[in-house]
Amino acid sequence: MDAETQKNHLKAYGVTYWTLERELKVKWLLNYRGGSFLLPDAEIIQRECQIRGVSFEVISNSQVEKILKDIASPSVNQEAVVLEKAPKIAVYTPNGKQPWDDAVTMVLTYAEIPYETIYDEEVLNDELLLYDWLHLHHEDFTGQYGKFYRTYRSAAWYIEEKNNAEALANKLGYSKVSEEKLAVALKIRDYVVGGGFMFAMCSATDSFDIALSAEGVDICEPMFDGDASDPGYQSKIDYSPTFAFKDFTLERSPNVYEFSSIDMTQKRKIPKTTDYFSLMEYSAKWDPIPTMLTQNHTALVKGFMGQTTSFTREEIKSNVLVMGENRTNGEAKYIHGIKGKGFFTFYGGHDPEDYTHRVGDPKTELDLHPTSPGYRLILNNVLFPAAKKKKQKT
């Protein structure tokens, strides 16, 4: 999985997942040649690699023993983690969304990793319990319809999405979309606290935390929910229930395409040509989880924009790991934390290979980006729940 010898990093994750589906164990060699996968030597696996265009090497048992012995050395920042079971994957997304509307569904499809789609009704019916891993599509959990009001309020798609959201909320017994979305956010919170893994990108990251912080507070203006927001609602925000963010200020104006001060999009002063973020390095033996989540063939990854591009460092809780950052710009791009028995990862931006993705832009062709470091970070998260849980060192 290094830069020099792997022709298709993304499909390599798909082959690994395919191997796990056949109840074969895999070793993930953290920090070894870009985070390589050690698979059983079987003709069907070799053939699958060839079909999918994935580069591989066949090695002898003695070579395997030497590699694992070298990795086990205390002086080497590497580790071999056993992957045991193909995680069952759910993507939270509304009906009718195209796969290219979302980077995660796009890369899962490209890597040939199976997933199921669920939405509000399934979440409220506790169907999340059927899954090991949940991705949140670019959702707005605050009930403000993505803050698209100023630019798109007359567009047919915006009107249709608003009508559909209101009809669904009414069907599920809620008078407002904001109340229904809060109920969904609380179910997702419970799923994570109970041991689930949640991965979110773009606006699903900050809008999720904002919804949790505003429980019982009306932060929506009349064009969103038909009545006025609570006076002085900023002072009523409670940061304690949030997963990742604290001390943020909400954007009051419905005409501003922004939820809060969490997002760095409007505060960034960095040209596209120098827009990169760096991945942190962790101890593979002592901190295997962040090490897994940052496996890559480069430590420097191209930046990319989104409604929520990146996160203000000062507004991230102290118990949340910043795994990718642009230090000169004072922003975090890729963060991870623990909530109860579960885990969450937030990744800023919309599409790692489409710098300024806009409504109506053509989809990204991942055949043109088979070695994308930005997309690898997504797939690290997909495989993470497959890892055998180790007892914590004390």
Image (cartoon, grey):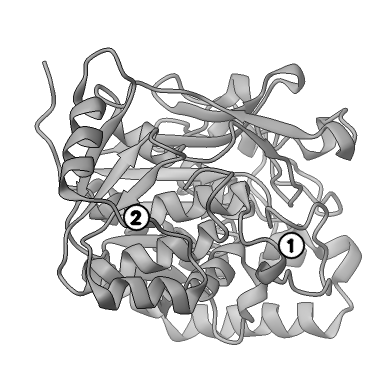
Crowding at mark 1 (Cα within 10 Å: few <14, some 14-19, many 20+): few
Q: Nearer the viewer, mark 1 or mark 2?
A: 2
Residue 94 seen in the current view: yes
The quarter of the displayed image where residue 311 is located: top right
Q: Identify the residue at image location x=76%, y=48%.
A: 305
From this view, report whether residue 302 is shown above or below residue 350.
above
Residue 45 appears at what percent x and percent y?
Answer: 30, 72
What residue did someone put label 2 on?
A: 383
Comparing 296 with 178, the one in front is 296
Marks 1/2: CA–CA distance: 43 Å
- Badge number at residue 222: 1
Horizontally, is 350 left or right of 54 in the view?
A: right
Residue 310 appears at what percent x and percent y?
Answer: 67, 38
Q: Secondary structure at mark 1?
A: helix
Horizontally, is 311 left or right of 13 in the view?
A: right
Horizontally, is 389 left or right of 284 in the view?
A: left
Residue 166 appears at what percent x and percent y?
Answer: 59, 79
From this view, report whether residue 222 is shown above or below residue 279.
below
Residue 209 appears at what percent x and percent y?
Answer: 50, 44
Three-letter amino acid code at the position of disc 2? Leu
Which quarter of the rendered picture does the C terminus lie within?
Answer: top left
- Badge number at residue 313: none
Q: Identify the residue at image location x=55%, y=62%.
A: 178
1 or 2: tag closer to the N-terminus: 1
From this view, report whether residue 10 is shown above or below residue 309.
below
Residue 179 seen in the current view: no
Comparing 173 with 73, the one in front is 73
The quarter of the displayed image where residue 14 is located: bottom left
Q: Identify the residue at image location x=68%, y=61%.
A: 369
